[in-house]
């Protein structure tokens, strides 16, 4: 974050007062809707409720905290290689759970490609986090690792985005209460499919946080992801988002073999073992 000029009032700029993890959860995540989808989809496919969830690339563990709040039978394993962000989650998320809920959270500082956990019902790799694996063999190795520790009737949930806008070098602003979220598709290489993406925040007092979060990903297509999942042993399906009367996404995802050629879209991949 660059140095900010303090307002004449002597107050610190908002950019120096806010917590970027709180901003991320507010502007990017909707863990209630995500867990609704996971819970309902698993129950519809398997005819029973899932109890044990593993959240890969868990970050602040926000999603896992929502999972253990849902039912007293729910347990979560949270895996991330970044101890700093795990510490933030422990201090700011786990600390707000009830004692019984905290007891059902298992925090693991480790590599998602090597850390094994007891057989789990559900594995999540959300917010496109697994796109950090840029080579097919690396992605296949990760998917095979998930397959190996997933319970026999387990399901792997992932998300993806795409459309022509996904590979354009552009910025998109979204207004929130008191700040603007900026999604910056900074660089894209059509030869390798790799892209550099940033999240910036701008505030009403004119202060900014540049590159609060940065990502170095390969932009994978749905056919590629499905093919690699199948090779790893999974049976993958696509759940496509519906639209409202204005043509905007309505948050309702339905299994289908036919998507819409939209400029920009987000989909879930549901992979059965």
Image (cartoon, helix red, strand yellow):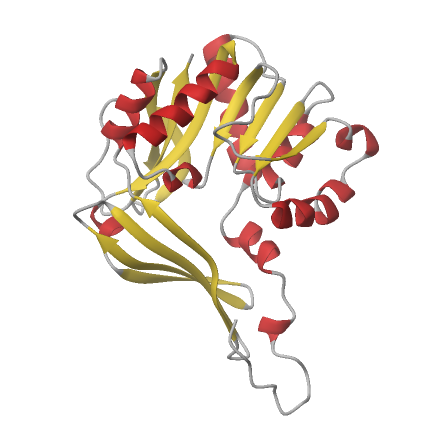
Q: Look at the image and tell me whether residue 148 can be seen.
A: yes
Q: Nearer the viewer, residue 138 or 156?
A: 138
Name the residue located 21 percent from the left edge and 45 percent from the top edge: 192
Q: Is residue 256 visible?
A: no
Residue 247 relative to residue 143: left or right: left
Residue 161 sits in quarter? top left
Tell me: residue 267, above or below residue 118. below
> Residue at 22% of width from left, 43% of height from top?
262
Percent across and percent down for residue 260 are 22, 35
Quadrant of the rendering where the C terminus is positioned: top left
Q: Residue 182: image x %, image y %?
A: 41, 62
Q: Position of residue 252 (x, y in %)?
A: 41, 32
Residue 241 appears at what percent x and percent y? 35, 34
Direction from residue 162 to residue 7 in the image, left or right: right
Seen at 63% across and 45% down, the residue is 83
Q: Does residue 109 lie above or below 165 as drawn?
A: above
């Amino acid at each position: 974050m660059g140095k900010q000029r303090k307002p004449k009032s002597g107050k610190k700029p908002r950019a120096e007062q806010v917590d970027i993890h709180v901003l991320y959860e507010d502007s990017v995540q909707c863990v209630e809707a995500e867990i609704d989808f996971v819970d309902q989809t698993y129950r519809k496919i398997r005819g029973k409720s899932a109890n044990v969830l593993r959240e890969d690339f868990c970050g602040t563990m926000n999603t896992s905290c929502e999972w253990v709040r849902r039912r007293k039978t729910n347990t979560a394993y949270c895996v991330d290689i970044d101890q700093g962000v795990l510490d933030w989650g422990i201090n700011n998320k786990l600390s707000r759970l009830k004692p019984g809920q905290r007891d059902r959270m298992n925090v693991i500082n480790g590599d998602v490609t090597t850390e094994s956990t007891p057989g789990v019902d559900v594995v999540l790799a959300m917010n496109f986090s697994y796109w950090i694996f840029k080579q097919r063999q690396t992605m296949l190795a990760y998917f095979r690792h998930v397959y190996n520790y997933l319970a026999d009737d387990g399901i792997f949930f992932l998300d993806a985005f795409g459309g022509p806008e996904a590979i354009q070098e552009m910025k998109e602003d979204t207004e929130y209460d008191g700040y603007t979220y900026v999604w910056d598709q900074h660089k894209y290489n059509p030869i390798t499919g790799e892209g550099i993406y940033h999240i910036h925040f701008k505030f009403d007092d004119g202060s900014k946080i540049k590159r609060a979060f940065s990502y170095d990903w390969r932009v994978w297509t749905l056919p590629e992801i499905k093919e690699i999942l199948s090779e790893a042993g999974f049976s993958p399906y696509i759940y496509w988002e519906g639209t409202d009367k204005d043509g905007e996404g309505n948050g309702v995802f339905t299994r289908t073999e036919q998507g819409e050629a939209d400029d920009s879209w987000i989909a879930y991949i549901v992979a059965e073992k």
